[in-house]
Image (spheres, rainbow, N blue to C red):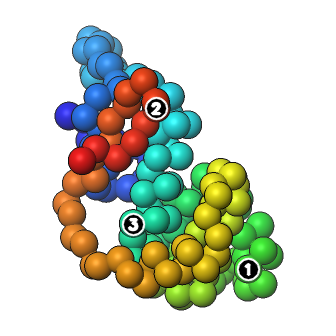
Amino acid sequence: MYHYKDCGLDNIWLVNGYSSIDDEEFGECVSITDTRGLHKAIAHDLVFNKPTLTGKEFRFLRKELDLSQKALSDLLGNDEQAVARWEKSGKVPKWADRLLRVCVIEFYGEKTGVRELIARIRDIDERKQERQLFKDDAAGWKKAA
């Protein structure tokens, strides 16, 4: 398994979908198959399976939307420093957490309504997992069971 830290999250591990070589000059070099698909799978897991987003997860989703802190703050009707504080402190207000999830759903073209999303978030049990495992198969990246 490969501990995928480049996305900015500490708990993402890849079961497959990567290759690595040892380079004398640079050390271990890793190539990931379909990084965009992997990030979409991670985003989907965060949006639909996390009861609350951490600051790092909020930042990951913001970056997936290709938004600066300023652009997201304008979208949320808040100031840029608030977004920076949430990402750094890890304390994201529920309204901002949920609105960002809705933006991610829209960005990826998911066919889930806002009411369904909010109901799913409410029903999620607080699940603590040290590792979030992802695998790549013929259908693309998805969370490993």
The disc at residue 49 is: 3
Instruction: Say which amino acid is labelled 2.
Output: Gly
User: Which of the 4 quarters of the picture holds residue 129?
Assistant: bottom left
Q: Is residue 77 above or below residue 103?
A: below
Residue 63 in the figure: left or right of residue 47: right
Quadrant where the N terminus sits is: top left
Residue that appears at 28% across and 53% down: 132
Q: Give the mark toward the camera: 1 or 2.
A: 2
Instruction: Say which amino acid is labelled 3.
Output: Asn
Mark 3: give few (<14), some (14-19) or many (20+) Cα within 10 Å. some
Q: Which residue is mark 1?
A: 76
Q: Position of residue 67 (x, y in %)?
A: 71, 59
Q: Which residue is mark 2?
A: 140
Residue that appears at 53% across and 88% down: 93
Mark 2: give few (<14), some (14-19) or many (20+) Cα within 10 Å. some
Q: Position of residue 21 (x, y in %)?
A: 28, 14
Which callout, 2 or 3, points at the residue further toward the start of the chain? 3
Q: Position of residue 115 (x, y in %)?
A: 61, 80
